[in-house]
Amino acid sequence: MKQSLSQKTLQIIKGIQQNELTESIIYERIAKFAKGAENKETLLRLSKEERAHYEIWRSYTRIDLKPRKGKILKFTLLARILGFTFAIKLMEKGEQRAQTKYAQLTDEIPESTAILHQESEHENALLQMLDEERLKYVGSMVLGLSDALVELTGSLAGFAFALQNTRLIALSGLIVGISATFSMASSEFLSARSEGRNDALKSCAYTGSAYLITVILLILPFLLFPVNQYLYALICMLCVVVLIISAFTYYIGVAQDQPFGARFAEMTIISIGVALLSFIVGILAKKFLGIDL
């Protein structure tokens, strides 16, 4: 027979109980489309664990709760688009932020600390067993992304003052970007082959894709702004650079448990720094070469 609980404690437990049920369904849904037999098995184990946790907390509330459909939809979509490792670890980070709320249970339910600690340890151990293919090629994506950001940001900044025409800048950037995409992808392929790897083609595809997507996003502002508003297009491009860096750094930070701040600052300083230097080079080149377009 469970002891009588205060309304405040009961509400906290209901929140935990509902969350356990919701996450159990999320793990089960993701397991249906996750690749790899071991990944499917691990996800189903996590689903069963969460369902068991739901039953533990249900023994205190003595009521059945419905799952949060919005959360199920959100994390199922994230898993399909950005990978199940990212979606699951993002979901677990949300749970870590809620741990302070759970600490309020200890006065009325002394064993709650042990239950929550055991749940956390077991789930972390199972999460470490997940092995998603796309995360094996993060190094290739980082290579393509960082190279594109540094090289093309510098090129477009240099073209901006030298050409002073958004269409010409976009055309020049597109030629440079596509050529560099093929160059980077082929270099990654040859590098992987020389190391005796069997995944050379996949590695080069991830590198080339990251590079090409970055090229398109950086050139887009010069296609959207009027011909003579090259400075506004350049500023917009630099904002896009910061957004790309922040989004990718956040993704890597969550999926691979890496710190966000240092990596973000490093990539941003390098990319913006190269852009400013290239802009100065464009000014000097136009002045000393006497070319006026």
Image (cartoon, grey):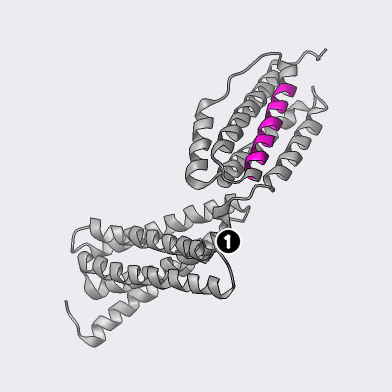
Task: Determine which quarter of the picture holds residue 139.
Answer: bottom right
Question: Can the viewer see residue 268?
Answer: no
Q: Nearer the viewer, residue 19 or 36?
A: 36
Q: Which residue is mark 1?
A: 262
Residue 54 in the magenta stretch? The answer is yes
Q: Nearer the viewer, residue 251 or 205?
A: 205
Question: Can the viewer see residue 164?
Answer: yes
Residue that sits furthest to the left in the current view = 293
Where's the C terminus, which quadrant?
Answer: bottom left
The image shows residue 165 at horizontal and vertical percentages of 20, 68
Read off the magenta span: 39-56
Classed neighbour count for the residue bearing mark 1: other residues with Cα under 10 Å, few (<14), some (14–19), many (≥20): few
In the image, is 287 to the left or to the right of 216? left
The image shows residue 239 at horizontal and vertical percentages of 38, 57
The image shows residue 178 at horizontal and vertical percentages of 33, 68
In the image, is 115 to the left or to the right of 266? right
